[in-house]
Amino acid sequence: MMTDLSPAEQHIQYVTSFQDLAYTPFEGAINAICWRRTLGGNFSEIVKRVALNGNITEIQPEELRELQLSEQGQLARDILLNDLQLLTAHGASPVLNVINHYEQDDSYLFFPTDVYSFHVDRSPIPTDTFLCTYYGDSSEILPNAQGQQKVLIPEIRDELKKLYHGSAAGFESFLSEHFFDLHYEAKPGARPISLGRGHLWRLAVDHPESKVPPCIHRAPREKSGQNRLLLIC
């Protein structure tokens, strides 16, 4: 583990190989592991060559192989195919997407539950979230100490109680069933950390066997106007 981390990065461990990324255990405060890389290749060329279909377009490996690319585009493609292969061999189910934007949740104006909101992932079985942004705006993570679960904020909790019409004993189950308890508010002065481009990350998930807090993260607002090239599983 690197020792020159800022206080906000003390929950991150940096590694130098996929093997270490996949198998280094989360422990203590560590709930985000990063295989930090500087990638060559022209990933924007791949984004421009893919035939887009709606807000989010999934690229299949076969389609990726069929793209007519320059030498730099081919280098980027080789990296993408290798990352897909590494994760698949690890037992994950990676998806490569070109993202124009995500759908925003407007069901509850005071409490959006879309991926632009800081949130954690939950699973009934042990698993992790892997992701890498190759092009476009990158995701952000928030140190757990800098976030507060929204359902614990009094004014938000009061509004949620107005939506709930069951017994008091069932309120917590209501919050979980509608995923309200997965979302977080950044505290004043919080400093989210950009995951950057090209780095492959593994984030801790809320599951029954987890020994660490789940990693708080969110998708970026598409401020640059660029479509994102994102691998996630």
Image (cartoon, rainbow, N blue to C red):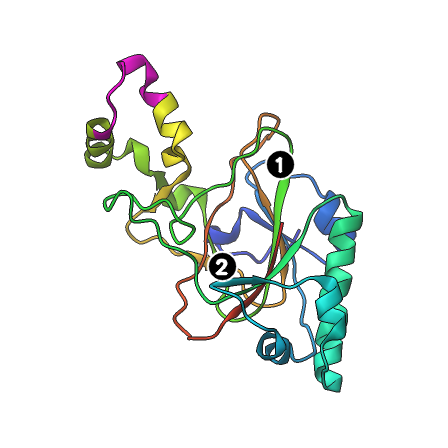
| Left or right, 42 with reference to 18 | left
Magenta span contains residue 74: no
Please tell me in which quadrant of the rendered image residue 67 appears: bottom right
The residue depicted at 71 percent of the width and 69 percent of the height is: 64
| Residue at which label 1 appears | 27
Residue identifier under label 2: 139
- Report the span colored magenta: 163-172
Q: Position of residue 155 (x, y in %)?
A: 19, 35
Position of residue 50 measured from the top left corner of the image (x, y, whole percent): 61, 74
Residue 210 on image: x %, y %: 59, 30
Choose top left, top right, bottom left or bottom right for residue 208. Answer: top right
Disc 1 marks a residue whose amino acid type is Glu
6 on left or right of 63: left
Whether residue 223 appears in this view of the structure is: yes
Which type of secondary structure does the marked residue at label 2 adopt?
A: loop
Q: Main secondary structure of the magenta part?
A: helix
Which comes sooner in the sequence, label 1 or label 2? 1
Instruction: Give the amino acid at mark 2.
Output: Ser
Q: Nearer the viewer, residue 72 or 46?
A: 46
Q: Residues within 10 Å of mark 1 (few under 14, many from 20)?
A: few
Residue furthest bottom in the image? 70
How many other residues sit within 10 Å of disc 2, few (<14), some (14-19) or many (≥20)?
many
Q: Position of residue 165 (x, y in %)?
A: 24, 21
**Disc 1 vs disc 2: which is toward the camera?**
2
**Which residue does the image show at 36% across and 54% down from the upper left?**
104
Of 220 and 51, the residue lying toward us: 51
Identify the element where label 1 is drawn.
loop
